[in-house]
Amino acid sequence: MLLVGFLFDLLGRRIVTVAAFVIGAISTMAIPLVAPSVPLYNTFRVIFIETMVVMLSNPFINDYVTVQSRGIATGFQTIGLTAGSLLSVAGLYTLTNQIEN
C-alpha cells in the first residue's frame, strides 16, 4: 500500500490509474490462455491482484465524495471491482471455450 501512494506522488494519479487498468486488463485476458500452465497462471493472477490493490487504495474517494458518503462509495467501489473481475474472467472463459471447439 505504501508503494502505491509513492507511485501516485511520483508519477501522478492519472498515469498510475491508467497503467493499472491496462495491466489488469492484459493479465485478465491472459489468465484463461495460460491456465494449463500453473506457474504462468499464478504469475498472471498475482499481477492482476496487484492492479486491484492500486484500484482499491486510490485517493479518489477522499477527493470527490463527501465525508458522510465515503463508506457507501468505498463499498460500491469494492463491489464493482469484484463483480467486474468475476464477469470478465467468466466471459473470457466462455470465449476461449468457443474458440477451442
Image: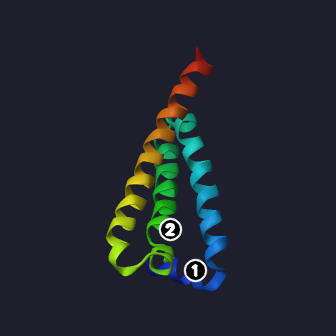
Q: Which of marks 2 and 1 is nearer the N terminus?
A: 1
Q: Nearer the viewer, residue 23 or 58?
A: 58
Q: Which mark is residue 36?
A: none
Q: Nearer the viewer, residue 37 or 87?
A: 87
- What residue is shown at x 50% (from left), y 54% (from top)? 48
- What residue is shown at x 52% (from left), y 26% (from top)? 94
- Badge 2 crowding class, 10 Å Cα cut-off, few under 14, some 14 to 19, many 20 or more, is many
Q: What residue type is labelled 1?
A: Phe
Residue 20, percent across and down? 59, 62
- What residue is shown at x 45% (from left), y 79% (from top)? 62
User: Which image quadrant: the C terminus?
Assistant: top right
Residue 53, percent across and down? 45, 66
* Residue named by callout 2: 54
Q: Assign a secondary structure to mark 1.
A: helix
Q: Which of 71 and 49 is in front in this view?
A: 71
Q: Which colour scheme is used?
A: rainbow
* Residue named by callout 1: 8
Residue 77, percent across and down? 42, 61
